[in-house]
Image (cartoon, rainbow, N blue to C red):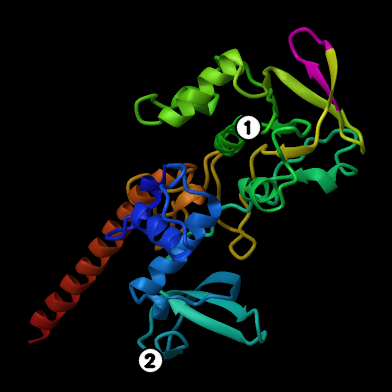
Amino acid sequence: MANWMELPNYPMATFRQQRQACRGHNDQIESLRATYEEVRAYYIHYVKRNRLLNYFRNGYEIISIERVSIDAPFYDDLTKEICTPEALWEIRGYDEQNKNPFILHAKYVVLATGISQDITKSLGIIGEQTSQSFTYTNLHDIEDLIINKKRLRNNSKPLLVIGCGLTAIDVILLCQKYFIPILHVFRRAIDDHELVLNQLPATIYPEYERIKELIRQSSTEWSYQCCPQSEIISITENGTVHIRNLRTQVMTDYEISFIARLTGAEIKIPFFPLVSTKKNNGLNINPYTYECIDFENVYALGALAGDKLVRFLQGGAFACAANLFKKHRQMLFNVNSRTRIAL
């Protein structure tokens, strides 16, 4: 899995081995799957290793992106240069540390903010608010519970996983590695084509194929219980969950330790509210260039473009870069043509 997430000229495996050696661990890496923390550290190190820090502005909050028509030469805070008049995107924000505001002007904008997993779709059930203290909405928090805080163990009460999207499957894969008991609840039937697991080729996504088989027959190696075509009715403060089977209408009670509510995140870009979205599939973009349909020279990558798998990121970035290069080359051609005509 880590191979899909690596950047050019620096294999993820090399980074993990070097990192392990620096920590005094010379034994073989346990898993092919990189953890959230490892991926985060890899990307930070990659930027430093390739001397790209000057191209990053960390710790800045964007508050608005607006189209402006600049009729006179203007000073750009980023390039520190006087620029010629043209229609541009104006980006406003501030430094989170000292609160100093800034204004940038750019011809092109690439939105790659991802989708916040903290704003997941609510269940609208009894006890949802009172169970917030033991409810989590992303893989990182579950990793933290298991690996760092060690509050989830193989002898804990089951972790309730709600949903059957890719994040839910990644949580199940993580729990399988550490033998954490799972109670898995989702509304669709196992064979429903809309279920994301049924849309992925087994040869390309072998790890997800294993989970699909697990869902079909449960597990004898570790405690995994699947409740397809079911819904949560209520959750009590002491960790009792009431589940109803949608086919039989039978109600069953379970004792759980924590909740992983992975019901999908809503796409919200507060600093660019005018951009439109397609139902359940990210922003409305050109699938070949990743340019937003409604706004010229604005691009979207990753989850915002509907690419929910990390392994799709490289294709989206390549499509975006290719289109930007094509536009830049066309602009240079037009400038040279006008120069020749003037001569």
Measure the alpha-carbon separation of dots 1 and 2.
Answer: 58 Å
Dot 2 amino acid type: Glu
Q: Quadrant of the C terminus?
A: bottom left
Residue furthest top in the image: 248
Q: Look at mark 1 in the image and give the residue it sits on.
A: 179
Dot 1 amino acid type: Phe
Q: What segment carries the magenta color? A: 241-250
Q: Decide which of 122, 281 is in the foreground and name it.
A: 122
| Callout count | 2
Q: Tell me where residue 30 appears, x and y as whole percent.
A: 46, 43
The mark found on residue 200 in the picture is none
Direction from residue 109 to residue 272 in the image, left or right: right
Q: Residue at x 59, y 58 (%)?
A: 274
Q: Residue at x 19, y 74 (%)?
A: 332
Q: Residue at x 63, y 87 (%)?
A: 100
Q: Tell me where residue 112 appears, x and y as whole percent.
A: 48, 59
Q: Quadrant of residue 335?
A: bottom left
The mark found on residue 81 in the picture is 2
